[in-house]
Each structure stands twice: as structure tokens, then as C-alpha cells.
Image: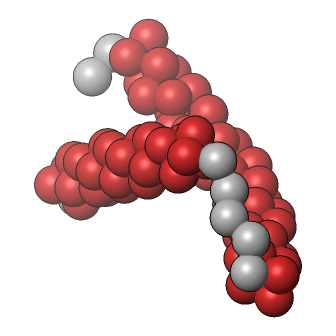
Amino acid sequence: MNAEATVTVETSLAALSEALAKASIDLAAVRVTLDLARANIAARNTSLARDVVSDAEKAIVHMRETDEALSHVLKKLHERD
């Protein structure tokens, strides 16, 4: 592997690591907010607009796709060892 490819791989993995660190903080905050909203909705016996459901489904799909992509990265890194 040449030096340019090594830098690109190292840079890409560093950027991925940074993104994961930020995402883990963001996801934890979102989870707290979602749990509070769910408790509030249940306590008041209220409902939300269907677009919230649609957006939640889209987020789930994106998270599954992200999980698959990360699994592929880890598999490739493991195969390299």
C-alpha cells in the first residue's frame, strides 16, 4: 500500500471515529428526549401527527443502513488482520 492510500485510509477511519463519537452523544440525548415524550404522551393519552411516525420509520431505516455499513467496515478491518 502506498503512503497516499495509507493516509487516506487513516484519515477516513479517523473521520469515522469522530463521527461515531459525536453520534453516540447525539443518540443518547435523542433517546432521553424520546423517552420523555413517550411518557408524556402516555400520561396525557394524546397522539401525534402521522408525519412523526413517518419520520421515525425513516430514521429507523437509516440507522439500520448505518449499522450495516459499520458492520462492513469492521469486517474488512478484521479480514485485514
Residue located at (68% from left, 64% from top): 47
Residue at left 76%, top 61%? Answer: 30
Q: Is residue 79 left or right of residue 70?
A: left
Inspect this view and state whether residue 35 appears: no
Percent x, y of residue 62: 42, 42
- Image quadrant in which the N terminus is located: top left
Look at the image and tell me whether residue 53 can be seen: yes
Q: Where is residue 42 drawn, in percent x and y? A: 73, 84
Q: Nearer the viewer, residue 51 or 57?
A: 51
Q: Please, which colouring scheme is shown?
A: secondary structure
Would you place residue 24 above or below residue 77 in this image? below
Residue shown at the point (15%, 55%) measured from the top left = 79
Q: Nearer the viewer, residue 65 or 72?
A: 65
Q: Quadrant of the C terminus?
A: bottom left
Most extreme residue toward the top is 4
Q: So how many labels did they put on this image? A: 0
Horizontal and vertical percent position of residue 71: 29, 55
Q: Is residue 19 left or right of residue 30?
A: left
Identity of the residue furthest to the left in this view: 79
Q: Residue 9's quadrant in the figure?
A: top left
**Depth order, front residue of 21/36:** 36
Q: Residue 31: give x, y in percent of width and height.
A: 71, 70
Rendered image quadrant of residue 29: bottom right
Residue at 68% of width from left, 56% of height from top? 48
